C-alpha cells in the first residue's frame, strides 16, 4: 500500500522479489523488477544488494555495470523514470567481502540519500550509484580491518 506513495524505493534482493511477486535471478530480471516498481509510483528504485549465483546472466538492464556477477560479488541496480516515462538504469558489481555485516541495506539507503543531495538527481544517478558503492566498500573494509 505504501509503494505508490514513495518517490524513492531501496529494497534489497528479497524485498524486491516480495514487492514485485517475481523471482529475480539476473541483472536483467532486476531491471525489469525496477520497471514494475516504477509502474506503481516511485520514480527512483535502487535494489541495494542482488546476490546472484554464477548462473545470473550478467546483463546490465540497459545501463553500465562492467563485470558479470558471481558468487563473490554483490550487484546494485539503480533505476530512474523521468517525467516523460523514459527509464534509465545502471548496475554496479561490487566484491563481496568474506564477512557477515548487519545493517548494510540501511547504510546503503543512507549513503544514497547523502550522495543524492550532493549530486542532485535525476542526471547524476550513475555517479551517485558509483559513490554509494565506493563509500559502502570503504566503510565495510574499514570495519573488517578493525576486527569488528
Image: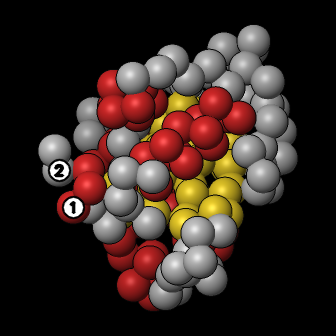
Q: Which residue is mark 2?
A: 2
| Closest to the observer, 127 or 137 | 127
Can residue 43 be seen here? The reply is: yes
Quadrant of the image occupied by residue 6:
bottom left
**Location of the C terminus (image quadrant):** top left
Can residue 134 be seen here? The reply is: no
| Closest to the observer, 13 or 67 | 13
Q: Callout 1: 10 Å neighbours few (<14), some, many (20+)?
A: few
Specify whether 81 is left or right of 38. right
Q: Which residue is mark 1?
A: 5
Q: Residue at x 47, y 21 (%)?
A: 22
Specify whether 137 is left or right of 29. left
Q: What SS does tag 2 mark?
A: loop
Residue 134: give x, y in percent of width and height.
58, 59
| Closest to the observer, 81 or 127 | 81
Whether 17 is drawn above or below 105: the answer is above
**Location of the N terminus (image quadrant):** top left
| Closest to the observer, 139 or 120 | 120
Residue 127: assigned label: none
Q: Residue at x 51, y 62 (%)?
A: 132
Q: Callout 2: 10 Å neighbours few (<14), some, many (20+)?
A: few
Quadrant of the image occupied by residue 32:
top right
Residue 63: give x, y in percent of width and height.
76, 56
Specify whether 78 is left or right of 20. right
Quadrant of the image occupied by residue 17:
top left
Residue 62: give x, y in percent of width and height.
78, 52
Amino acid at each position: 500500500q505504501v509503494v505508490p506513495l514513495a518517490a524513492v524505493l531501496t529494497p534489497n534482493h528479497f524485498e524486491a522479489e516480495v514487492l514485485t511477486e517475481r523471482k529475480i535471478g539476473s541483472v536483467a530480471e532486476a531491471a525489469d523488477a525496477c520497471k514494475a516498481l516504477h509502474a506503481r509510483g516511485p520514480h527512483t528504485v535502487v535494489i541495494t544488494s542482488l546476490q546472484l549465483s554464477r548462473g545470473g546472466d550478467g546483463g546490465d538492464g540497459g545501463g553500465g555495470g562492467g563485470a558479470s556477477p558471481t558468487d563473490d560479488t554483490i550487484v546494485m541496480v539503480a533505476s530512474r523514470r523521468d517525467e516523460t516515462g523514459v527509464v534509465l538504469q545502471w548496475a554496479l558489481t561490487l566484491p563481496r567481502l568474506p564477512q557477515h555485516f548487519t545493517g548494510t541495506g540501511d547504510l546503503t539507503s543512507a549513503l544514497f540519500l547523502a550522495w543524492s543531495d550532493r549530486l542532485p538527481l535525476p542526471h547524476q544517478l550513475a555517479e551517485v550509484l558509483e559513490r554509494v558503492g565506493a563509500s559502502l566498500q570503504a566503510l565495510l573494509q574499514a570495519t573488517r580491518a578493525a576486527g569488528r
